[in-house]
Image (cartoon, grey):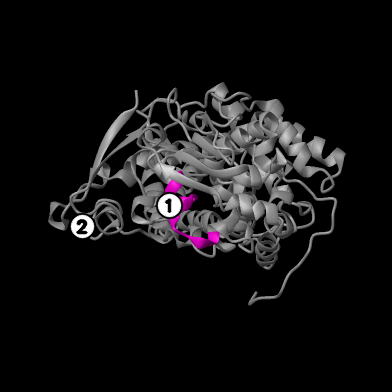
Amino acid sequence: MTVTHTVRVHRSEENLPREQQLAHKIAKVATDPVEVTPEVQEMVINRILDNAAVAIASLNRGPIVSARDQALTHAPGPGGSGAALIGVDAATCRVSPEWAAWANGVAVRELDYHDTFLSAEYSHPGDNIPPILAVAQHAGRSGRDLIRGIATGYEIQVDLVKAISLHRHKIDHVAHLGPSAAAGIGTLLDLDAETIFQAIGQALHTTTATRQSRKGEISTWKAHAPAFAGKMAVEAVDRAMRGQTSPVPIYEGEDGVIAWLLDGPDASYEVPLPAPGEPKLGILETYTKEHSAEYQAQAWIDLARRLHREHPELTDPQNVESIVLHTSHHTHDVIGSGAKDPQKYDPQASRETLDHSIPYIFTVALQDGQWEHNRSYAPERAARPDTVELWHKVTTEEDPEWTRRYHSIDPQEKAFGGRAEIRLADGSRLVEEIAVADAHPLGARPFAREQYLTKLRALAEGSVAETELERFIQAAEELPNLAAGELDALNITADIPLETGAKGLF
């Protein structure tokens, strides 16, 4: 049975024993030899397929080119065989695992198109896979080892996200990723609790950052941020294995993360973690994206597509007086008009900014009846005069009930959508609502293996040879049976020239 741990700030003179510290409790979860359930194993494979899909679609985008070029200058050391880079033939090129985590992490994150879990905090748990896989390849581990490591990474990410809000204090959600990836790598390598404990502390200490990366002129760093956290996790584990220690207590110290970055010295959190012997099921609570957009936009895209079919007159701004999306605090405040960010209505805004503008996303999905990861963000698409006119008629408002449902821990009522109230030029009014995306486990068309494969094949088309793609799919589906040293099979070689960019220091 899940155990809830009270986590609070302690004065230095209290000398909080490490066994009572959250980082150590996480480490103990990571060392638990409990078997992975068949359902978790199946979902791990699904998410490896999902990560590959979105990474392939990004291979020649600027941030990936830059990160890949950096990684290619860092050959593996003598401690292992190195790790593979997505798109690059692993038989001819391998790099140091922390740099593989970096480059592959950027590729996975770039399109904002992989899995998500939302609770007290936001997260993309699939960001755990690149660093854990990179270390697994470097260290010659088996498919079973990898599954166990990924299950831990997801579990810790989900548990932290359920309990500790970072965004409330404008701290980026990657601060939960460093510890979860470090824990996952610890499980993968069968490290002892003390080593994992020190790695978790280091990973957290080096991955706290502000949310300015998601506001204003949202830059390419949005894709780099989780990759950096993954890279830091790999390096933290390496240092901890060499006997190097972290700030202790990292969460609970009077000058620590909770006291000065989060809710302050009087704060207290209730963090759920699996009891000893309890399976790590966190990944089963997460969900992926059908559309390349911020997760809070998924349900709104599906509603917009439905309105396109049922009310085509709404695509013409001349027929619409206003569109108000009544939704959760997060959707309103972060990607809606509540952000008070003029960039969210700017036709010349970056792709990253448009990805965080629900007025833009809803408008384009309403007019086009679909959402496409490239065309929907194209500068010419954003600048279309009728789109700009309709876009500026779309606003958001917080609705306390949708905020409550957003934060609910009951999966049957947890929701990420809202209610659209549309006032037409003729004075009539149209009201429609949606709670969860179609692809959500409780949605109209929940994702299963078939949908993950469809997404992969669609995004890989034109970039990967069919024989190579089917080989990869077969390897992923046979993951539990891959022996030690066979995890290179989870890399995909591109069938297109891979671009290079401007030279830096390396």
Q: Are marks 1 and 2 in contact (CB under 8 Å)?
A: no
Residue ID for mark 1: 338
Which x, y percent locates residue 316?
68, 44
Q: In the drawing, does residue 56 fall left or right of residue 400?
A: right
Residue projecting furthest to the left? 13
Residue under the image location 73 percent in, 41 percent down: 489
Residue 402 makes an appearance in the image: yes
Residue 428 vertical placement versus 329 (above, below): above
Disc 2 is placed on an element classified as loop
Label 1 Cα crowd, 10 Å radius (few <14 / some 14-19 / many 20+) = some
Mark 2 highlights which residue? 254
Amino acid under disc 1: Gly
Boundaries of the magenta span: 331-343
Instruction: Residue type at mark 2: give it.
Output: Glu
The magenta stretch spans residue 342: yes
**Residue closest to the eye, 63 or 351:** 351
Q: Is residue 77 above or below residue 297?
A: below
191 or 206, nearer to the observer:
206
